Amino acid sequence: MATIPSDLPKHHVATQSEKLTIAASSLGTVFEWYDFYLYGLLTAIIAAQFLSGLNQTTAFIMALLVFAAGFIVRPFGALVFGRIGDLVGRRYTFIITLLVMGLSTFLVGCLPTYKTVGVAAPIMLVALRMCQGLALGGEYGGAATYVAEHAPNNKRGLYTSWIQITATAGLAMALLIVITVRSPVTGIGEDAFKEWGWRIPYLLSGPFLAVGLWLRLKLHESPVFQKMKDEGTSSKAPLTEAFGKWPNLRIVLIAFFGAIAGQAVVWYTGQLYAMFFLEKMLKVDGLTANSLIIIALLLATPFFLFFGWLSDKIGRKPIIMTGCALAVVSLFPVFHALTNAANPALARAQASAPVTLNANPAECSSQFDPVGANKFDTTSCDIVKNALAKAGVNYENIAAAPGTIASLTIGTNIFVAPDPAKVSGDDKKKAIAAFSAQVVGAPEVKAKPAEGDKPAVEAKPAVVGELSKVGYPTKANPDEINRPLVVALLFYLVFLVTMVYGPIAAMLVELFPSRIRYTSMSLPYHVGNGWLGGLLPAIGFAMVAAKGNIYYGLWYPVIVAGITLVLGLLLLPETFKRTID
């Protein structure tokens, strides 16, 4: 590709047309990300409403997988809409994607729940999530390409960084609306929000869709595409040309492994996994976790523009590689520090009374049961792990000889699990319940008289488990949360996101020729962000459930970011001086 001409104006001032292009493209994309990430913010509530037939641990992981379903289909949306964008035009394509996304999100707010229609509820939810994923698969490449093709060569990083802001802005917008609606001061309160108020943010996508469509209908086609169309030089088979010819496919592979993969895992660790970690692992209530995340997002968001601007000066590659390197060396220390700041009682308990599981590894399952058929009561190890998974407790596994009955050490006390080979039926259920109460505790049960076919319920007092006795909290104490430190740590994680994400749209646009640009950049981007990134929360928490270490899931982003760092340094070209006409 050609380099930027030396006589290009150094202080280009954006025209009204360029400002409208950026505003309409960016705002429409913000609305799409708002729609897409609502589910991520409401995962725990979605699990309760649509997956109530599964056990608690599996329901949460399955809810994350439903969330990930939208990410899984994103590459297919990239293929479909990328091809249309290279054949028909950029403008028409992302008008369609906005319409599909907005309608799908609105309909989620209208869905019946599991209590109403049973398994049909999660099936419909998955279908709508897949429609969202298809739409998003076509949206990003179109918006980034459209803005880049309107931008002057020496401002491409800055102009496209407005598109890079949209994902975080959409997440922040969703957070603000969720916080406002669920707050007892400004909204309907937590109980009502969990029951029915979660629908409100979804239904608001209706008016957002109308605004986004109005803005995008005011736009004209990209000048680069229009020129290709007028001259008859556009691609007749963009998929074949992009992925069936080795020179182009080689660039796709380098872009994926040398930039996109690391960017994806850093993004989803810093903005979504961190939020899930606060709520699920550190037991911070949802409203507080959302509030702390949004402060960090608002503080860090300007750095998308800063790193986009800086990439026009020093290049895209050094900024992205630095972000990956910092993630590799700092994710573990930052998440340990997050535990100390967000739930000091949990950190103290982990230090003073560590939990150890002594069991035969062959008898220990992963605690993941997608069909809800496994009760995790056939081995002594599973009985222990199931109790600890429900409590969300960090523990260490120690391998024992075959035939050993699993035991749990909490501090200095040892608790031996029931042996399923020696008890069965109601006796096994009682033994498991007694063990769980002894370790985790049990809530108070109020007496209920017999009603119809339901037997009478005998009153039982609350039981304080050993974990609570040695200091493991059931939830984070709001008065002990070091909010400034939590925000600072979350800000750092989002700051890493801005480094890897701010310059990448400009880099991807510059890597590929204009005739197949939409297709070529969309597929690797959405494979990376849809599969490696979108599956990160589900994979991370499945890893935690399997190993018992609340930090174990971080190995996934650390290893992927490390691979990108090495391959990017070796293979990724610098692109910031290229023209794209």
Image: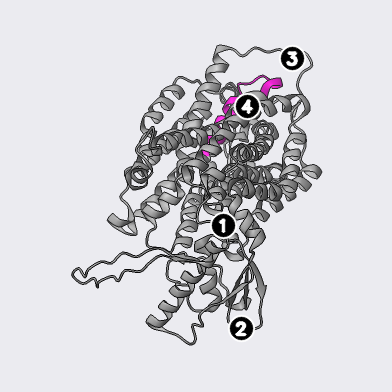
How far is the residue under mark 1 from the one under mark 4? 30 Å
The residue at 59%/12% (across/down) is: 15
Nearest to the observer: residue 509 or residue 427: 427
Residues tagged 1 and 2 counted as in contact (Cβ below 8 A)? no
Q: Quadrant of residue 361?
A: bottom right
Please tell me whether mark 4 sits on a helix, a strand or a loop. helix
Q: Which residue is mark 1?
A: 541
How far is the residue under mark 2 from the one under mark 3? 75 Å
Say which label, 3 or 4, has the lower sequence index: 3
Which amino acid lies under the numbered mark 3 shown in the image of this protein?
Answer: Leu
Nearest to the observer: residue 505 or residue 58: 58
For discs 2 and 3, the disc positioned in front in the rendered view: 2
Q: Which residues are magenta?
A: 138-156
Please tell me whether mark 1 sits on a helix, a strand or a loop. helix
Residues tagged 2 and 3 counted as in contact (Cβ below 8 A)? no
Q: Which residue is mark 3?
A: 8
For discs 3 and 1, the disc positioned in front in the rendered view: 1
Is 570 on the left or on the right of 463, as rendered? Answer: right
The residue at 47%/62% (across/down) is: 58
Residues tagged 3 and 4 counted as in contact (Cβ below 8 A)? no
Instruction: Give the label on residue 404, or none.
Output: 2
Q: Position of residue 418 (x, y in %)?
A: 50, 80
The residue at 47%/56% (across/down) is: 60
Say which label, 3 or 1, has the lower sequence index: 3
Which amino acid lies under the numbered mark 1 shown in the image of this protein?
Answer: Phe
Is 109 on the left or on the right of 555, as rendered? Answer: left
Taking the magenta stretch, the answer to whether it contains residue 144 is yes
How far is the residue under mark 1 from the one under mark 2? 28 Å
**Quadrant occupied by the C terminus:** top right
